Amino acid sequence: MADTSEGPHLYNPQVGEDRKPQIEMEFPSLEEAFTFYNQYAHESGFSARLGNSKKNKRTNEVGWKQFVCFKGHTDEKQKKVAQVDSVKERACGEVRTGCMAKLSLVKEQTGENWIVTKFLESHNHPLSTPSKVHLLRSHRHVSEAKKVLKQQFAEANIPTCQQVRLLEIDSGGPEFLGCTKRDIRNFERELRDEQKGIDAETLIEFFATEKEKNSAFFYAYEIDSTGRFTRCFSVDHVSRRAYNVFGDAVVFDTTYNTKKYGLIFAPFIGVNHHHQSIVLGCAFLSDEKTELFVWLLTKFIEAMAKGPPTMIITDQDPALTKAIGQVLPQTVHRSNATEKANTNDDESYEEDLGLTPCPFRSEDRYYHSLVSKLKRVIQAILEVLNIMQNISEHALET
């Protein structure tokens, strides 16, 4: 790809004459001129970038433009600043080598075309091989087709590293991908930046779309006087149908918090006939006030044709307890918080269970772990028996 016939330190690209820029070659626009020069750079093995420009004093429009090699024009000002600055910076290789390869164009005075006036093809640095030229900056680009594929992969929760691998396979190899993993991540960042400020609108549009797909989809949301998104609740047709069968006992938990938005994630969880956890609905709340819990529980009952659950299990939250008393007065309310026994109480716990104290307690490193597991198992059994008894009593009363 390189020829050093003109000197020991000059490299001339080996590209056909019909694909090289020529003096007095005309282009209808700067964009087309750069596209042509960048394609030439790709075949040659270097990266092109925009160089200096000059404006016409009368029209204040650009009348002269340069495209240069990415290693051209060493920044002398930056070097002087680095010498003056006493702070030590991370050592890194030199990118600019003062390469003089360039393409200069001038705009016609009576037309719109751009004419090539100067073309230097010799480089003072080795050129990249065909297997590595796709890694150079001007030749890396995430195409529209790859952007669509990447968004589909993201919706399927495929990690970025696997997305890049799939795109490489689809393109026929890394050298034909046209971008790098960093470019894919930069595109992800751009998508996130575009979503800033319109996240709530996007969520509401998603709810409306799901409602159009299936009329059984239920959702509700509220916005405060300042236009801030404060609460929402949604449940699909699968969860509503599951609640009709497995909605006797519901667990409601508000211990999850989203770091980015400061919203509380509050799911309604049930258990099916396979002893598997199932989602019966979910909500986002801006805080844990009684007013919000009353609104949420009201929407939950509105969405479920079966009506209130027989029993609801929550954490120990006074505001939530008050809301349940107002909205679900006939529902048995239990707390899932349990007292954690201290390991120093192992001996008294053994006596309560009718066990013989272990004489090697202090020397057996597995002893405390065994007793702790036994505590949790027995405590879980007692809780289940207590819940079953409460349900039976409630059923007899009704």
Image (cartoon, grey):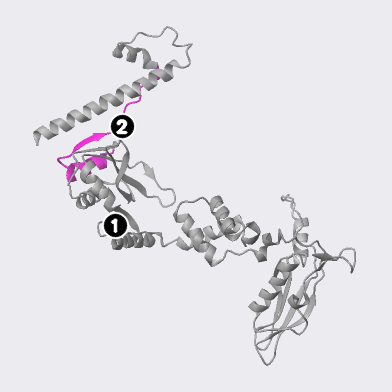
Distance from the alpha carbon under mark 1 to that under mark 2: 30 Å
Residue 390 in percent (x, y) is at 18, 30
Residue lying at 69% horizontally and 71% vertically, measured from the top left: 39
Give left or right: position of 19 versus 59.
Answer: right
How many neighbours does mark 1 have within 10 angstroms: few (below 14), some (14-19), or many (20 or more)?
A: some
How many neighbours does mark 2 have within 10 angstroms: few (below 14), some (14-19), or many (20 or more)?
A: few
Q: Which residues are magenta?
A: 317-343
Residue at which label 1 appears = 221
Residue 346 image-quadrant placement: top left
* Helix, strand or loop at mark 1: strand
Residue lying at 35% horizontally and 47% vertically, measured from the top left: 265
Residue at which label 2 appears = 337
Magenta-span inclusion, residue 357: no
Give left or right: position of 209 versus 244.
Answer: right
Residue 226 in percent (x, y) is at 33, 61
Residue 10 in percent (x, y) is at 85, 66
